[in-house]
Amino acid sequence: MKLSGLKVLDLSAFLPGPMLTMMMADHGAEVIKVEPPGAGEPTRSIGAVKHGQSVYFRNTQRGKRSIQLDLKAPGDLALCLKLAAEADVLVETWRPGVAERLGLGYAALSALNPRLVYCSISAFGQDGRYAQRPAHDLVIQALAGTIQPGEGPAPSMPIMLSADALSGMTGLSAVLMALLGRERTGQGDRLDISMYDSLTAWTANAVGEVFAHGQAPKAASSRFWGGAALYDLYQTADARWIALGGSEPKFAENLLTGLGRPDLIAAARTPPGEGQAPVRAFLAETFKSKALADWEAWFEGRDVCWAPVRSLAEAYADPFLTQRGMLAYDAEGCEVIGSPIRFAGEPAQIDPHAPEPNEHGPAIAAHGWERPTS
């Protein structure tokens, strides 16, 4: 497998760091998960439980070995340092300065292990005015301007933890770049990954008005927030919703011709905003005339970029996820979310087992990175 032989020490918690290390485990890396004493990783007690284990924990910690360490206790710290001295990658998600106070900062560990790739994921990065500010995903999204309020009375709560997700993927990309660089130089590196930076980096599609005119984008004239008739949400007769997600001329022609209004094609080709108002009005009235099931039948076979707006439960009931390997089941029937990283020659080999607290602690304390033979 691509990452076989790599040793990853996971000192992270919640979503970004654990997802990063889990994706490495899915592709062969040996990951040791260090948990605090007592309840352990916080996600063990967050959300719904199935077969005695949090679904959240199971789908972010699978394939790892668990050891519980009190990093303020000299003996446990010494063991953690021993593991770090042999690791290829270390991932931590503490607030800046915590690792240094514990004796686990990059300067100390790189002196022990110059080849170590040390990845810090934090809310705002290791420096700057916000570095010590506490934050989780919602706060990052709010500050970064990605909870789009539009012209409505209030912004809506995001369903996706976008700052968490993007910082995890940014961290994974950076770790792999650093490992590639280490092949040439023999030296590891310190990675400073910020949730805020990671989210900001993906706003290129939205900042046209900000950079060109110094003002926030207005929903009514924005392609991405309702200004484009063919990129919007429409309610059906049974109070369900349809998403149109493609403004290309061919999709407008196919949809409007199929609905008997080719005369509106020219308006659909105008820039997002008031010029497309007749198209939006027609589509809103038309989609309210039938139930979602009727529209699904109507769209079948038509080359139009569209989808029903589904709940998460409906999305996971779609056989497509199983076909793609993005949903499987372990021996107990628990759902396993697949790996999105697909190699033709070396597919992920997912170990669905998520460890119990300190499950591997005695073995790791006795043998370190080496797995006991019996």
Image: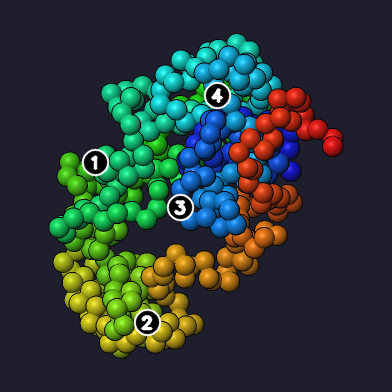
Q: Report the mark closest to the observer, 2 or 3.
A: 3
| Viewport quadrant of the N terminus | top right
Question: Does residue 195 appear in this view?
Answer: yes
Whether residue 26 is situated above or below residue 254 in the rendered picture: above
Whichever of callouts 3 and 4 sits on the residue coming sooner in the sequence is: 3
Nearest the camera: 150 or 210? 150
Whether residue 109 is situated above or below residue 324 in the rendered picture: above
Instruction: Spot the residue most to the right.
Output: 374
Q: State the CA–CA distance, disc 2 to disc 4.
A: 55 Å
| Viewport quadrant of the C terminus | top right
Q: State the CA–CA distance, disc 3 to disc 4.
A: 25 Å
The numbered disc on residue 211 is: 1
Whichever of callouts 1 and 4 sits on the residue coming sooner in the sequence is: 4
The residue positioned 47% from the left and 16% from the top of the image is 100
Residue marked by disc 3: 47
Whether residue 328 is situated above or below residue 71 in the rendered picture: below
Nearest the camera: 286 or 143? 143
Hey, what amino acid is under mark 2?
Leu
Residue marked by disc 2: 292
- Horizontal side, residue 128 vs residue 67: left or right: left
Whichever of callouts 2 and 4 sits on the residue coming sooner in the sequence is: 4
